[in-house]
Amino acid sequence: MKREMRQRLMKLGTVAVLGIGVFAAGLLNRPSRTLAHEVEHNTYMVQAGGFGEANVEVLTFAPSLVKVHRGDTVMWHVTSLHNMRFGEAEEQFIIVEQIGDKPTPVANPKIFFPTLQSGAAYTGGDANSGLPSVDAMKSTYSLVMDVEPGLYSYRCDVHPGMAGIIEVVADDEVIPSPVEVAAQADKELDEQINPAIGAFFGAAVTAPKQAVDGVFTITAGTGGAGRASSLTFNAPLAIIKVGEKVTWTVPADSPTPHFINSADYDPVAVADIIPQENAGGPPTLLAGPGFLGTTQDGATIAAGESFNSTMLPPGGSFSLVFKDAGVYAYICHVHPGMGGVVIVQ
Ligand SMILES: [Cu+2]
């Protein structure tokens, strides 16, 4: 996938370079001073997240800072569930709203819905790309930066700490080309992905082989590598005895939360977020069982019973007691490829 992405970027870069070449050739007889003004309106790619070996995902915008001229386009390559929102205020992914007289967890509409469509001009202030739909998660979103020189910061609200800056510079300032920006993006992603691959091997080496005092502890995802982590369980095969407990913990320095779901979990059948129309208003997105879970922490699971935790934030944990012999496969439903098996003897 990464190679494909690179090829696409190269192609884009080549087109941009050719474009500049043709344009520059037409301007040969003009004073060179006008060149910086005329050769404008490049498109700069920013990677919104990325992936590496050992199921590593990095939750950054790369490059984290991109310099553009006014009128240039910034195009984000969105590799997962990310939004880009310009604005000062912090927004929570799930908020509690009074619906009737009942406090109800709902998906924050300020995150989910776009206020600027892709391709529009950004003229300053608050603006949000909205979230890509699940079937269009590999997508692009672009904005024409039609603003005064200055720093414009934005963030992804799904992943706290994931932020980037667009610096709009004066027309006559020479800035890195789209090809150079693409190379910088790859470099920044690799610098984060590589330590996370290391963390994956470290976690595997120290993984427990058996329950201690009746508890088998499994680490969900890795920490210790900044914005990147391996979306794996350090003990993907846990063998316990009937009546023993499994506790999954998310490292406190994990950049992402996780879930513990029975392998038969179907995120389509069990909607994470249930849209509900308001009479005359915007839709309210009720947070569904995908986020809230259906199984209490510490519950006892019988043969064939399914289990689904609530969202486990960094530092969070979730335990199950297995009372029957059997094979219990599980996944994290938001992270493809993240799964494990508990064998109860
Ligand atoms: Cu996960």
Image: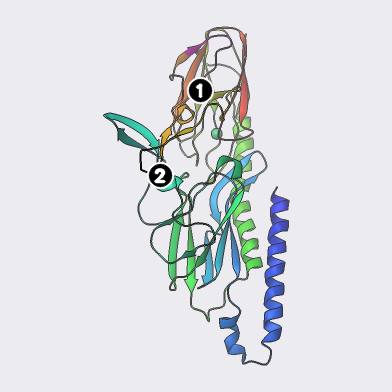
The spot of residue 63 in percent (x, y) is 56, 59
Using the image, tell me which numbered label, if any, was put on residue 141: none
The spot of residue 210 in percent (x, y) is 59, 17
The spot of residue 181 in percent (x, y) is 61, 65
Residue at position x 57%, y 46% from top?
58
The spot of residue 112 in percent (x, y) is 45, 45
Residue at the spot of label 1: 308
Quadrant location of the C terminus?
Answer: top right
Which of these two is toward me, 309 or 228?
Answer: 309
Residue at position x 61%, y 23% from top?
263
- Element carrying mark 2: helix
Question: Looking at the image, is 241 positioned above or below residue 54?
Answer: above
Q: Is residue 143 visible?
A: yes
Q: Amino acid at mark 1?
A: Asn
Q: Quadrant of ligand 1?
A: top right
Q: Is residue 160 visible?
A: no
Q: Amino acid at mark 2?
A: Pro
Q: Which residues are magenta?
A: 300-304
Question: Looking at the image, is 118 positioned above or below residue 112?
Answer: below
Which of these two is toward me, 258 or 314?
Answer: 258
Q: Which quadrant holds residue 134?
A: top right
* 123 to the left or right of 202: left
Mark 1: few, some, or many residues within 10 Å (few <14, many ≥20)?
many
Quote the CA–CA distance across marks 2 and 1: 25 Å
On whether residue 246 falls in the magenta region, the answer is: no
Mark 2: few, some, or many residues within 10 Å (few <14, many ≥20)?
some
Using the image, tell me which numbered label, if any, was put on residue 109: 2
Q: Main secondary structure of the magenta part?
A: loop
Q: Which quadrant holds residue 37?
A: bottom right
